[in-house]
Amino acid sequence: MDINSILGILFAFGAILGGNFLEGGHLSSLMQFTAFIIVGGGTVSACMVQMPLRQFLGGWKMLGWVFMPPKLNPAEAIEKIVGWSNIARKEGLLGLEAISENEPDLFARKGLQLLVDGSEPEMIRGILEVDISTKEHHSLSSAKMFEAMGGYAPTIGILGAVMGLIHVMNNLADPSKLGGGIAVAFVATIYGVGSANLFFLPFANKLKGVINAQTRYQEMIMEGVISIAEGENPRNIETKLQGYIY
């Protein structure tokens, strides 16, 4: 679990609500269901128009990575790759066949299968690079959904503010209805700007960081598999791959 993301959100709420309290404001003044519907519904709808359904749904599926990113253990992966190299030197590449069948990481399993099949190093690189590039492109496209939401939300918030002011202007003769319209106007702006800068844009950048880490992890595995195919010394392979750890 990424405790930094959870703490960041808690601190954001604490800072805003705490500042509102210090200024003499009340929590109820920030709770406007109408403003929430305008900003939330408008922002999501704009994203649905912008991107294909698969990309839109993929973004929501990846949201959990902000709090629980996929577990990557480069040190453990290097240890496994060095073990594969030792087996290949002692038993030949066919000695990796049983290991490839039981490898839980699909990308590593594909690399091992290419090794067992006797593929040339350049062919292995070409095949695995396509896999890495395709997955990275798909993941980044889904992560951009939150980036798009961060762009639309403030504008939709302004739209909600204008709608609230229109309501105020239409009810100038009835002072009892002015408060609600003014509240919707200002709270909609807060929702739009706040959601963009506290949630959507940070979510997008966090997901990009997770995707970048996954890409580097797979590149490390690819280099290890290619090094085994080229018959490099296990110790040299370990030294090379340790450069991916930072």
Image: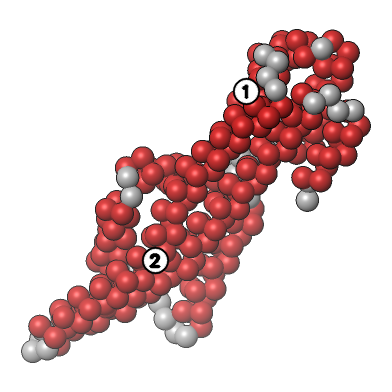
| Nearer mark to the viewer, of 2 and 1 | 1
| Disc sitting over residue 110 in the figure | 1
Residue under label 2 = 151
Characterize the local packing of mark 1: few (<14), some (14-19) or many (20 or more) Cα atoms within 10 angstroms.
some
The front one of 207 and 227 is 227
Helix, strand or loop at mark 2:
helix
Q: Is residue 73 in view from this perspective? A: no
Q: Position of residue 159 (x, y in %)?
A: 25, 73
Residue 170, horizontal then vertical, whole percent: 10, 83
Residue 166, visible in the rendered structure: yes
- Residue visible at 51% across and 79% down? 19
The answer to whether residue 111 is above or below residue 203 is above
Residue at the image point whose x is 8% and y is 89% from the top: 173
| Residue closest to the eye, 103 or 13 | 103
Q: Upstream in the sequence, badge 2 or badge 1? A: 1
Rounded to the nearest whole Å, what is the CA distance between mark 2 and mark 1?
39 Å
Task: Classify residue 1 as left or right of residue 14.
Answer: right
Kind of residue sitting beneath label 1: Lys
Image position of 58 (left or right of 76): left
